[in-house]
Image: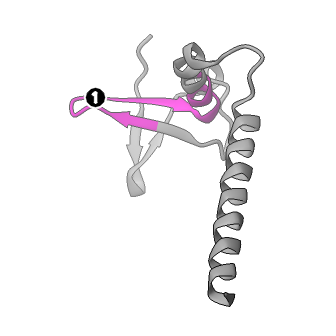
Amino acid sequence: MTFHAKIIAGGKISLPAELRRALDLKDGDTITIEHDGVSFTGMSHEQRIKRLQAQFAPYVVPGVSVVDELIADRRAEAARDDADYAGQAAKRLA
């Protein structure tokens, strides 16, 4: 579909009501605008999230929580740091 929008004072774009309804945009909503050097594309915050989720979907392993993996990695790193610090402190006291 093609819509026409008008640039108003301050560089604001007035989107047609039909387009706002189609995209379920409400006053105060944020949209993301991508520019490729020739044209631009706008999408709602929710649409952007869905697009990113679809891009990363091939990397999701069912039953594996990347959050749990990240927390485990950080805890292991902190434990190594604590052990290194304790070893350095013991050397200074010796």
> Which residue is more in the foreground, 34 or 73?
73
Q: Residue at x 69, y 80 (%)?
A: 90
x%, y% of residue 36? 27, 31
Q: Left or right of 4: which side holds 45?
A: right
Seen from this angle, which residue lies furthest bottom? 93
Circle 1 Cα neighbour tier, 10 Å, few/some/many (<14 / 14–19 / ≥20): few
Give how far across and how far down residue 13 sits, in percent. Answer: 44, 42
Decide whether residue 47 is among the magenta residues: yes
**Residue 31 rendering spot, x and y as whole percentages:** 54, 38
- Quadrant (top left/top right/bottom left/bottom right) for the N terminus: top left
| Secondary element at image label 1 | loop
Q: From the image, which quarter does the C terminus lie in?
A: bottom right
Residue 73 is drawn in which quadrant?
A: top right
83 or 31: nearer the viewer: 83
In magenta, the rendered stretch is 33-50
Quadrant of residue 52 in the image?
A: top right
Q: Quadrant of residue 72?
A: top right
* Residue at the limit of the structure toward the left, as seen here: 38
Residue visible at 59% across and 16% down in the picture: 57
> Would residue 18 appear left or right of 26 to someone viewing this image?
left
The colour scheme applied to this rendered structure is one colour
Residue at the extreme top of the image, as rendered = 1
Task: From this view, report whether residue 63 is shown above or below residue 14.
Answer: above
Is 21 placed above or below 10 here? above
Q: Would residue 90 be counted in the magenta stretch?
A: no
Foreground of the two, 32 or 94: 94
Residue visible at 56% across and 29% down in the picture: 48
| Residue assigned mark 1 | 39
- Residue 5: x and y in percent read 42, 32
Q: Amino acid at mark 1?
A: Ser
